[in-house]
Image (tube, rainbow, N blue to C red):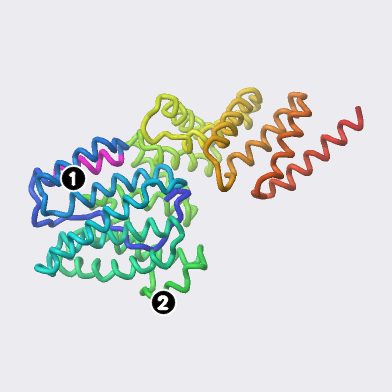
Amino acid sequence: MNLHGIKLFFIIFILSLAGSSASNNRFDSLIVSGINQIYNIKLDAALNTFNTLKKEFSNHPSGYFFEAMVLWWEIVLNTSTEEFDDEFIDKLEHVIDMCDEILDTDPQNIDALFFKGGALGFRGRLYSLRESWFNAALDGKDALPIVYKASEIDPLNPDIQLGFGIYNYYAAVIPEKYPVIKPFMVFFPNGDKEKGLEQLDFVAQNGKYAKIESIYFLATSHYSFEENYQMAFVYTEQLTERFPDNPRFQSLKGRLWIKMNNYKMASIIFKNILDKCDAGLYGYNKMAEREASYYVGAYYDRIGQADSSRYFFERCENVSRQIEEDETSGFLINSLLYLGRLNKMKGSVNKAEKYYEEVFEYRDYNGSHEKAERELELLKKGNKLK
């Protein structure tokens, strides 16, 4: 998704409850309001909305499920931390237990089937994000028959197609991208990429509760797997127009402009992200600042504004040093290479050498060691000629 860095898996992902027996105007309005608040990254407001849902419909699993979705977006906004993982899993397991109690007395209860499948799917999605593939596969295996059963009971529900669409797509493309997944495919039926995309587009056009998630999935799939940036942009534009303060949606739009080689338009997006970081908007965290400052720096470098470029790469460098611990990102490594060159252009040779030498302290990222070595050799030759 990343979507970015988020590693995708073929887990069934359900965000649907159409046809609910508890459904009424108040029930629907609370859920729709809460979902929109989540996507707008108004997470405190969403939590209040779902607490109201829990109070007014205390025997229904929906409030508890969507309460967990608030935590899911906390995870999405900063996938590098596992701060919310345990609480998220605890809340999903509470939903599963609650649904099991309902299904013990009413095996055909569509709501319990929906939310149990959804809880299993999201738990599996977290496991896949953390590369716990076996646990992810087990949850996917348990979720799949629940989706089929729900579909048999409510075959006209468009939201159900989200689960099938994601399954068909992931089951076809993920094993090819991540070969480590292939041994787990013995648990599952074959996927169908084209059918999956058709099902997802159907939900994007006709879904009630799963519409936005389907659009987001299509945007990230076309970006990450299909490399169809024009199509990804169509879906991403829908997301950013409706939810302009969602950093994940904004970032994806900016990166798409980069992929389409339009750094000017990308810089507009990423400057706006930096403004929101400076203003302290929720979700516009150090991760967003790091990425945005890097791409703005790259834009100024392309148009020959060295001072501005150096300013933003230094900002990226500083933010990277604040947040990176176990593994250095490509943002920092590339920033060091840019800063080495920019300082060389300025005549600050000693400073340039320090930047290039630091590159060797980190992993080799897209030939970064070779690039730094080449630049250092050129600097040494230049010094000898003086």
**x and y percent of residue 343 in the render?**
72, 28
- Does residue 54 show up magenta in the picture? no
Of callouts 2 and 1, which one flags the residue occurring earlier in the amino acid sequence?
1
Residue name at image x 42 percent, y 51 percent: 1
Q: Within 10 angstroms of label 1, few (less than 14), some, or many (20 or more) residues?
A: many
Vertical comparison of 318 with 326: above or below: above
Q: Is residue 146 left or right of residue 131?
A: left
Q: Give the residues drawn in magenta, as a range.
A: 28-39
Q: Which residue is mark 2?
A: 186
Q: Is residue 196 left or right of residue 184?
A: left
Instruction: State the residue lying farthest toward the bottom.
Output: 186
Q: Main secondary structure of the magenta part?
A: helix
Q: Is residue 168 above or below residue 362?
A: below
Residue 260: % across, % down: 52, 43
SS for tag 1? helix
* Outermost residue toward the right in this view: 385
> From the viewer's perspective, is 82 left or right of 87?
right
The amino acid type of the residue labelled 2 equals: Val
Q: Could you say whether the residue bearing mark 2 is in a helix, strand or loop? A: helix
Circle count: 2
Identify which residue is drawn at 23% across, 52% down.
65
In-image side of 5 versus 157 (left or right): right
Instruction: Mark 2: give few (<14), some (14-19) or many (20+) Cα within 10 Å.
Output: few
Q: Which residue type carries mark 1?
A: Ile
